[in-house]
């Protein structure tokens, strides 16, 4: 399958940092991030945003989503207040169009 | 751009690392009065941001001149109150904690209410301020996050930015004058 770059759906990468009262395993964080976005945006909104957690390590992660839904995904992340009854806070560190730029800018 | 969070409920010293220029701390720079009857509409305390908190529209309208910020929990639509706030050049407080600390249908319900309320505020040219009402650091949100929340509440990016920059700054300037 060959698609021209202009025909591709534009993406954005959001860097995030998780703050929590206790340490939470990465798989649980990943599951709950998807869950909270789904809860916040609904199935339709989730399909439009198409979020994907690309990397998560030592409470810092990168999530990829559709360019038009960045603010909604950001809001969904920010409004996540609990993971498995542990109080958490997800902060967005920055948004970028390319993974490399985000990694160098935010030193991830 | 200078960002402000006018209502934090704990002694928050690291606000500059979050990107805020200044914050309002409860019982230090802010005095919140929960009003249930007209006797509680006490006199204004100088050099402090006075917030009136009541579910009664009549009480809020009565006390509007004495206070700087109006918090109307539930955000029921009342155009007379919104017009009164606009005419007296006061502002509504829109706390993010009201959305953050609930989930599911309750969150959807309160977000819908706030969205309608803000739409009416914009139509009546009433000012509003986005605050966190954070009880600890886990509830504090950075300015860009507050803007994202403002946008999902139906504000444009400019309106959301104004709600955490110009409007709170003008209230602070008025109070500290």
Image (cartoon, coloured by chain):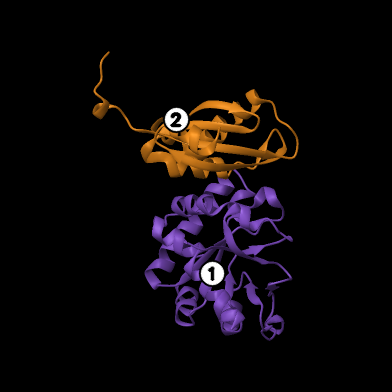
Chain colours: A orange, B purple
**Mark 2 falls within which chain?**
A
Q: Label 1, label 2: how many angstroms apart (C-alpha)? A: 37 Å
Secondary structure, mark 2, is helix
Hey, which quadrant is residue A43 in on the image? top left
Residue at the top extreme of this rendering: A1
Task: Please tell me which residue lies in front, B8 or B62.
Answer: B8
**Looking at the picture, how far across and down is residue A25, in whole percent?**
69, 26
Residue B9 vs residue B174: left or right? right
Q: Residue furthest bottom?
A: B43
Residue underneath mark 2: A100
Residue B113 versus residue B127 in the image, above or below: above
The quadrant of the picture occupied by the C terminus of chain A is: top right
- Left or right of B25, for residue B177: left
**Near-viewer residue (B86 or A9):** A9
Q: Residue at x 69, y 79 (%)?
A: B37
- Which residue lies under the disc numbered 1? B168
Q: Are marks 1 and 2 in contact (CB under 8 Å)?
A: no
Residue B27 % position (x, y) = 74, 70
Q: Is residue B99 left or right of residue A88?
A: left
State the residue in front, B74 or A27. Answer: A27
Choose top left, top right, bottom left or bottom right for residue B161.
bottom left
Q: Position of residue A23 (x, y in %)?
A: 73, 32
A101 w.r.t. B130: above or below: above
Mark nearer the viewer, 1 or 2: 2
Subunit that carries the residue with mark 1: B
Locate residue B168, reporting x and y percent. Answer: 53, 69
């Amino acid at each position: 399958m060959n698609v021209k770059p202009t025909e591709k759906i534009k993406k954005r990468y959001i860097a995030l940092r998780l703050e929590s009262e206790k340490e939470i395993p990465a798989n649980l964080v990943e599951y709950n991030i998807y869950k909270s976005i789904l809860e916040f945006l609904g199935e339709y909104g989730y399909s439009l945003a198409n979020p994907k957690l690309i990397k998560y390590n030592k409470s810092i992660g990168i999530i990829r989503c559709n360019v038009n839904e960045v603010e909604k995904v950001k809001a969904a992340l920010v409004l996540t207040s609990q993971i498995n009854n542990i109080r958490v806070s997800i902060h967005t560190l920055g948004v970028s169009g390319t993974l490399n730029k985000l990694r160098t800018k935010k030193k991830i | 751009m200078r960002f402000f969070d006018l209502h934090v409920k704990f002694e928050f010293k690291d606000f500059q690392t979050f990107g805020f220029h200044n914050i309002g701390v409860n019982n230090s720079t802010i005095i919140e009065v929960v009003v249930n009857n007209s006797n509680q509409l006490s006199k204004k305390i100088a050099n402090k941001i006075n917030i009136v908190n009541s579910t009664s529209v009549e009480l809020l309208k009565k006390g509007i001149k004495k206070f700087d910020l109006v918090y109307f929990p539930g955000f029921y639509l009342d155009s007379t109150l919104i017009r009164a706030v606009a005419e007296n050049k006061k502002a509504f407080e829109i706390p993010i904690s009201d959305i953050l600390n609930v989930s599911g249908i309750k969150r959807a319900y309160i977000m819908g209410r706030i969205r309608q309320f803000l739409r009416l505020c914009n139509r009546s040219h009433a000012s509003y301020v986005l605050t966190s009402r954070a009880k600890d650091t886990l509830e504090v949100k950075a300015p860009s996050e507050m803007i994202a929340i403002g946008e999902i509440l139906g504000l444009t990016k400019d309106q959301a930015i104004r709600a955490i920059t110009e409007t709170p700054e003008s209230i602070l300037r008025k109070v500290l004058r």
